[in-house]
Amino acid sequence: MSFVHLHTHSEYSLLDGASRISEMVRLAAETGMPAIALTDHGVLYGAIDLYLQAKAAGINPIIGQEAYVASRSRHQKEGRADRDPYHLILLVKDLTGYRNLIRLSSQAHLEGYYYRPRIDKALLAEHTEGLIALSSCLGGEVASRLLEGDEAGAEQAAREYQRMFGDDYFLEIQDHGMEEQTRVKVPAWITKFGELYSPNMCVALLKALISPAQAKTLEADGKPMTYGAVVKNFVIALVPFLMTAISLAVVWWYVVIHQQAGAATGPIEGLQQLGSAVPPPAETPAEKGPDFQFYLWFGISAAVLTLWTARSYWRMTGERFEVLKLLTSSVMPLGILTVIVLAVILFGITTATESAAVGAAGAFILAFHARTLDWKRTKEAVFLTAKTTAMVCWLFVGSALFSAVFAILGGQALLEHWVLSLNMTPVQFMILSQAIIFVLGWPLEWTEIIVIFVPIFLPLLKHFNIDPVLWGVLVFVNLQAAFLSPPVAMSAFYLKGVAPSHVTLNQIFQGMMPYMLVIIVCMIIMYIWPGMTLWLPNYLYGG
């Protein structure tokens, strides 16, 4: 994936930028960036210089400016209120946008100059065509209002810019190690809650559970705080502990308790003659239980997680608690849904189709929770699901017919005879099979490869003493490189269709090469140390 700087300053940003355009262009070209933007403060002095040097270096110049937007009118020039305008990044996307940016910059100097060349929203609204707007740094109106604690004002400003620019308005997220860029607005009730009970929110909530009288004097989200709200927030505070405890408990139950319990309740086999002694059967791995290494690493993991959890609670200030609430309400539902869908497949509770239904039901619940579920989205989701399902079904039907005809006409037997006549070693067969699947992954869909060609190789695995599960995992990792992950094979052509015109197909394939190398190294490691691949299937389904 390529990266492009869209917010940069050169020596033309007086008292703010120190970078020279020639050095910026050289570094962008050397690091493989396809383009670079120049957004100097209030001026376009470096636009021609950037254009000429970027074109000479073979990269795309993006002309822009970090404009100053007056908080009132560009014609008002009175004291501090008009001396500190907001910042707004404007990027040119076509010739019309370039002309509009020139007009805005000229008017800012001729009409709006007061300490700095300023435009206002009225002028900006007349010249938005062909321009892309970014919300800018901490000096932008959205960020400035957020720092002041005015969330409603920040949202109003963002929506106002969105009405002007439509889909060409974007919010910037920056992290330069500045405390202001990572600050989270703490609701007033959390601050007062900490003053009443304890700065540590976990301790404060525990005290409030015992003595809720003071908590009930506060208001949260415009409503009086109830005992139920205290309980709810305390449960949210317990999320790190619950995640750690449940994860460790599930691992312990499945490895130590579940497998040995299953072995102990197995059927009793064999006959015993009256009066004779029958030697006890040898213990199975499940009856023996996990070896020492499991207990050692489980103990180390449990100790590390316990220390991490304790440290989290020791440092749980109001700000950290608010971050935890945001993560719990946004990431947690999707995470739980993902774990449930994967778990029901791995543990054999449902088939893949049934687990997809579980995922779909969960998606409906998430949409309802986020208040984005409506009839229009439901129709679109159903239509896209039916369309994709029909496509996959036809692929499988066609692939299955081809595979059946190929086998009936003797093609599979002929191929098996040819492979066996080569007298290959298991390593050579593994390389040959993976290479064939890799090459097929360029012109064919993955479904065709799995349904047509994988059954051809499966009967040969026993001859070469290769674990089918290991070989299957290697096939899927192989397909990740051969088709599934862009920008490889047909995906490269898909990307070419949506990429900017200056991005060539060769550049897309060049970007794929490092990923390809990583995949090949992973496959080699998996084959040399198969235990890394097979430990989960062995635990779930037995050796």
Image (cartoon, rainbow, N blue to C red):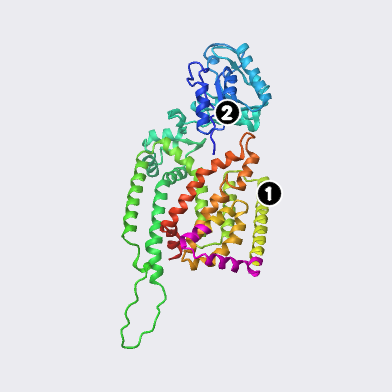
- Residue linked to disc 1: 379
Residue drawn 51% across and 55% down? 340
In the rendered image, residue 442, in percent from the top left (x then y), is placed at 60, 51
- Asked if residue 421 is among those painted magenta in the image, a careful observer would answer yes
Of helix, strand and loop, which mostly describes the magenta segment? helix
In the rendered image, residue 526, in percent from the top left (x then y), is placed at 44, 55
- Asked if residue 261 is among those painted magenta in the image, a careful observer would answer no
225 to the left or right of 271: right
Three-letter amino acid code at the position of disc 2: Leu
Of the residues tagged 1 and 2, which is closer to the observer?
A: 2
Quadrant of image for the N terminus: top right
Is 356 rendered above or below residue 43? below
Three-letter amino acid code at the position of disc 1: Lys
In the rendered image, residue 491, in percent from the top left (x then y), is placed at 61, 46
In the rendered image, residue 510, in percent from the top left (x then y), is placed at 55, 41
> Residues in magenta?
405-432
